[in-house]
Image (cartoon, rainbow, N blue to C red):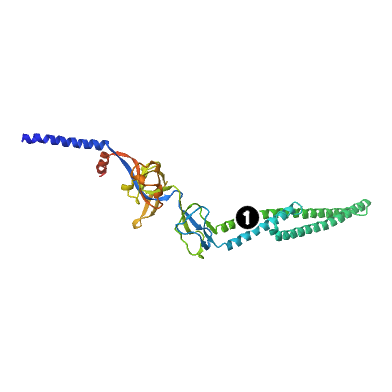
Amino acid sequence: MNHESTRRYPILWFMALAIGAAVAFSAFFEIDQSVRAQGQVIPGSRTQVIQAVDGGVLTAIRVREGDRVRAGDVLAELEPDRARASLAQAQAEVLSKQVALARAQAELADDAPDFTAFGATAQAFVVAQTGLYVQRRKTRDEELSALQSSLALARQELDMSRRLFAAGDLSRTEVMRAQRQMLDLEARTSTVRNKYYQDARIEVTKLEEELAASRARRDERETVLRHTTLVAPMDGVVKSVKVNTVGGVLRPSDELMQISPVDDALVVEVKVNPADRGLLHAGLPVTLRFDAFDSNIYGSVPGRLRYISPDTLSEPGAQGRAQVYYRAEVTASWDDLPAGGARRLHPSDIKPGMIATADVRVGTRSILVYLAKPVTRAFSGALRER
């Protein structure tokens, strides 16, 4: 009996030492604490949507899905005839307003209009405005001439009345009548002259406003005509061609295709659980694993958390429930790749649309704290129960 007890002591001591060593190891050995999020690879400058801004009839498609294009390359063309005719009408309207404004400004300055700045295309407008200028000038001059003739006679009559009044052959009343008649004719002459300039000033103001509106319409129709030729906004690859029917009618803002950027820095866009948001901030280190490449063979890629959305987003989830998340972006740090398996991955291997898992390192904690967490959580909850 004593012999068996004596033999048990070393075993108990060994077990105690092993347990103590395990506790000490778990208390001092730390492991990374991370937040996991999934997402996909996207171009850093986003896919560009090519739309028929003003709509129209599709007359040609110059590219196919998968074609590589450069900025400025023609992608598709819309029927331009209506837009071109509308622009020509707007340009003619601008030209007519410019010629009319030149005529009105000449009338205001009491000078002959100068139409030499307008080309042959404005000849019809120049002829019409020249005729209008001559007619208005003639009407004014004839009216002034008649008034001035009447005014000369009224002055003669007033002089004669004053002489007869001085000789005692005419009453003061007749002299005053003749004087009122002369003053009235002078006022009418001044009114005709002032009205001519006032009308010219009003017309100049009105034509300047109309010219500004006509120029705005012309610029708008120039834009419409320019939009009948759809060009690539950047270098990229054509994808998701939505319309292939030449002769089809497109509504304003209809999507024709998309251009995916090439030679552009790729980022991983992930969805972060709102419960993990408090642990995250821009700049945290990230470990990226791509589903297309077995991480046991190709390893992982280091990166950095670049951006977190300021508010949550939502989208339809399973069983009709909305999925709420924060959108975050992670950039890969290819220069920080360790020697080994991950060297087999190259930036050119990563393509837009690939699924990726991001483990964001938010800190460290000991194994003992990790193992004790369920116990402390349950104990804390138990203390709060009634």
Q: Left or right of 278: which side holds 18?
A: left
Q: Is residue 333 visible?
A: no
Q: Is residue 342 visible?
A: yes
Residue 145 falls in image quadrant:
bottom right
Whole-percent x, y for residue 277 in the image: 37, 45
From the viewer's side, name the closer residue of 104 and 366.
366
Whole-percent x, y for residue 202 in the image: 70, 54
Whole-percent x, y for residue 346 in the image: 39, 47
At 47% from the left and 58% from the top, the residue drawn is: 257
Residue 221 falls in image quadrant:
bottom right
Residue sitting at the far right: 167
Up-down relation of residue 25 to residue 164 (above or below): above
Q: Residues within 10 Å of mark 1 (few under 14, many from 20)?
A: some
* Residue identified by numbered label 1: 215
Residue sitting at the far left: 1
At 32% from the left and 47% from the top, the residue drawn is: 297
Q: Left or right of 21: which side holds 138?
A: right
From the viewer's side, name the closer residue of 351 and 101.
351
Q: How many marks?
A: 1
Identify the amino acid type marked 1: Arg
Q: Left or right of 108: which side holds 384?
A: left
Q: Left or right of 208: which side holds 254?
A: left
> Which secondary structure, mark 1?
helix
Quarter of the figure with the N terminus: top left
Quarter of the figure with the C terminus: top left
Whole-percent x, y for residue 86 in the image: 60, 61
